[in-house]
Amino acid sequence: MSTAVDIAGPSSPDQAHSSTKIPNEPLRPSLKRSSHPYSLSHYMSTPSSAMDVTGLIQPSPAQQRAAQPAHTKPRRAPSWPDMWESPSGLHLAHAAELLMRAGLLALTPRDGEGGGSGPEEEEEDSLGCGTEFQPFLGAWFPFSPALFPLAGFQMGGGRWRNAAMVGEGMEGLVAEGYSPGSLGGGSGGRRKRKRCGECVPCRRQRNCEQCSSCRNRKRGHQICKYRKCEELKRKPGGPGFETRISRWRICSSV
DNA sequence: TTGAACGTCCGA
DNA sequence: TCGGACGTTCAA
């Protein structure tokens, strides 16, 4: 039995296909996938509505055994079954939303406990430049950190932050693939955004070879539809883009 | 230089 | 509104 799950399109057409030109490796080393005990078919056959949030928080004994061998120290979160194989990743987004609603993911204001990467992060004002969340899940958190971009969270200053709140700031803009330089109005030229590398499509390692983008790669110049970064799918700039830039400038000038 | 892929235009 | 085509940018 193989623990490696092939990240493919909904019909998994590439079980026997793989691009010889397009690198199959994730964009970042941190994206290397950890082994997990579940297969793609497991998640494909598991409706979202059946996903019990409490089960996510407190895996069943069988899940714990599968994810945490007895001889290993419970150093970090058990490897929660990798639901990234879901074509849409809605399991994770749904679960995260449920957690938010249940209060298991709480938005907590900064209390100056430190941990920030720099003095500017200690600053906080009415613009909400420094709000962050912390999970109330005890010693470990059952989600892969890669979940958070799906659920609207973004990494900033070594912490995951809620995009709805810090999306007003630089973190959100950078998370969308914009470089600080391109935001500063310096070059002013068209800049290509980069894949986030953490969303479900980005984590796919193979092209489906069946979508229009794959079929028309030579002429279409497009990445496989199932590998298209969720961030890049969003409209460049998006709603409130200018406001976010101006707010970031205010924050960064404090 | 080449290939991958984002941004944009335009037709259906 | 969506998808295809192409120009362009970027990295190897």
Image (cartoon, coloured by chain):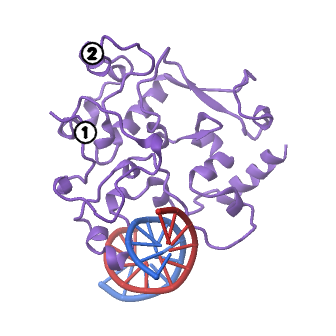
Chain colours: A purple, B blue, C red
Number of numbered tags placed on the structure image: 2
What residue lies at 64% left-to-right and 46% top-to-bottom? Answer: A171
> Can residue A19 be spotted in the picture?
yes
Tell me which numbered mark, 1 or 2, is placed earlier along the sequence.
Answer: 1
Q: Which residue is rendered at x = 40% and y = 13% of the image?
A: A73
Q: Which of A152 and A9 lies nearest the eye of the viewer?
A: A9
**Under tag 2, what secondary structure?**
helix
Q: Is residue A201 above or below residue A223?
A: above
Q: Who's the residue at 32% across and 18% down the image?
A: A68
Identify the mark at residue A4; answer none if there is no mark.
1
Question: Which quarter of the picture shows residue A131?
Answer: top right
x and y percent of residue A161 in the render? 59, 36
Identity, as a three-letter code, of the amino acid under mark 2: Arg
Q: Specify whether residue A168 is in view.
A: no
Residue A65's mark?
Answer: 2
Quarter of the image for the N terminus of chain A: give it. top left
In what quadrant of the picture does the C terminus of chain A appear?
Answer: top right
Q: Position of residue A45 (x, y in %)?
A: 18, 38
Point 29% across, 75% down: residue = A216
**Where in the figure is residue A148, as x and y percent of width and height?**
48, 38
Tag 1: residue type?
A: Ala
Q: Residue furthest right?
A: A254
